[in-house]
Amino acid sequence: MNTHIWTQYFLANRNRFAEPPLPAASSDLPKSIRVPLVKSLAIFQLGESGGGTRLMRYVKQVVSGPRLHGYEQAVQLFIEEEQYHSRLLEKLVIHLDGVCLQKQWTNSVFRWLRNHFGVEFNIQILLIAELIAEAYFGAIYLRCQDSAVRICCRKILADEMRHLAFHAEFLRERLNKKPAWWRTLWRAQFRLFNLATCAVVAWDHRDCFRAIGLAPMEFARMASRTGLRFLRRLEKPHTLWLARSPQQNASVATNT
C-alpha cells in the first residue's frame, strides 16, 4: 500500500475547499423540505463526529509490516477529514434552523459493531457508511436547491470517493493474502450487510428522501448498486477512483 501518496493527498486536501458564506438569515428552502432535510443531515453529522480512538487502536495492531509504514499517519489524517465534515455539517444544520444530535439509534448500532471486531471489520463498517454517504450526498447535491447545502455536499462527496479508494487499497492487500474461498465468503457477507444497511438508512431517512422527490426504496436500490460497483472496483487500482470529478461522482452515485 502506498501510504506516502495517501498522506500527501490528505495533507494537500486540507486547503482545497473554501467554505461557502452562510447567510445570517434562514435558508430559503420551503419548510416541507427544510425540516426533514435538516433532521436527516443531523444524523449524518453525528456519524461523522467520532474521535477515531478505537480505529487507531486497531490500526496500531497491523502497522508492523514494512508495506504499511506510514499507514497510521494516513488513517489519522483520514479521521481529521471526517471530523472536518462533521463541523461542516454542523454549520449546515444550524443554517437550516436545526439542532445537532447527541445520540441516534442507527449511529449507536454502527459504533457498537465497529467497536467489537477487528480492524478489517472496522474498515468494512466504515466502507459501508461511506458507500451510503456517496449515494446520499449525491442525491442531496442533485435535488436540493439551497446553494450552501449543494456546495458542502459536493465537497463531502468528493472526499468520500477518495476515502473509499483509501480503504479499498488497504482491504485489497489484506484480501489478496486470503484463499479464493475466503474472499468469496467475504464478498457475500459484505453484500448482505450492505443491503441490510441500505434498507435501514432508506427507512430512517424516508421523510427527507420523499421531501426531495426520491422514493425511499429507490434510494435503497441506488445505494445497493453503489455497493456492487465498489466490489467490482475493488479489483482496480485506486488511481482510477481518483480520476472522477465531483460532478461525475454525484451522477454515478444517483444513476438509476
Image (cartoon, rainbow, N blue to C red):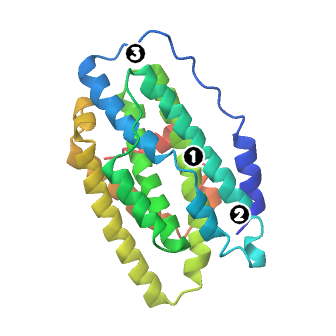
Q: Earlier in the sequence, mark 1 or mark 2?
A: 2
Residue 237 visible in the snapshot: no
Q: What's the amino acid at mark 1?
A: Glu
Q: At 34% from the left edge and 37% from the top edge, which residue is drawn?
A: 40
**Image side of residue 182 versus residue 212, left or right:** right
Q: Where is residue 188 in the image (x, y as percent from the top left)?
A: 36, 76
Residue at position x 51%, y 45% from top? Answer: 49
Q: Find out whether the residues at labels 1 and 2 contact each other: C-beta distance under 8 Å.
A: no
Q: Name the residue under label 1.
A: 82
Distance from disc 1 to disc 2, alpha carbons, whole Å, reads: 15 Å
Residue 102 in the image, given as x and y percentages of width and height: 41, 41
Q: Is residue 41 visible?
A: yes
Q: Quadrant of residue 144?
A: top left
Residue most toward the top? 25
In the picture as drawn, the residue positioned furthest to the front comes out as: 102
| Residue pictured at 29% horizontal, 25% vertical | 35
What SS does tag 3 mark? loop
Q: In x, y percent, where is residue 251?
A: 43, 41
Neighbour tally class for label 3: few under 14, some 14-19, many 20 plus, Cα within 10 Å: some
Q: Which amino acid does label 2 sit on?
A: Glu
The local secondary structure at tag 2 comes to helix
> Would residue 212 be found to the left or right of residue 174 on screen?
left
Residue at x 65%, y 75% (from the top left corner): 61
Q: Residues within 10 Å of mark 2 (few under 14, many from 20)?
A: many
Distance of mark 1 from mark 3, alpha carbons?
25 Å
Mark 2 or mark 3: whose residue is earlier in sequence: 3
Badge number at residue 72: 2
**In the image, is 106 to the left or to the right of 182?**
left
Q: Which residue position holds label 3?
A: 27
Quarter placement of the N terminus: bottom right
Residue 160's tag is none
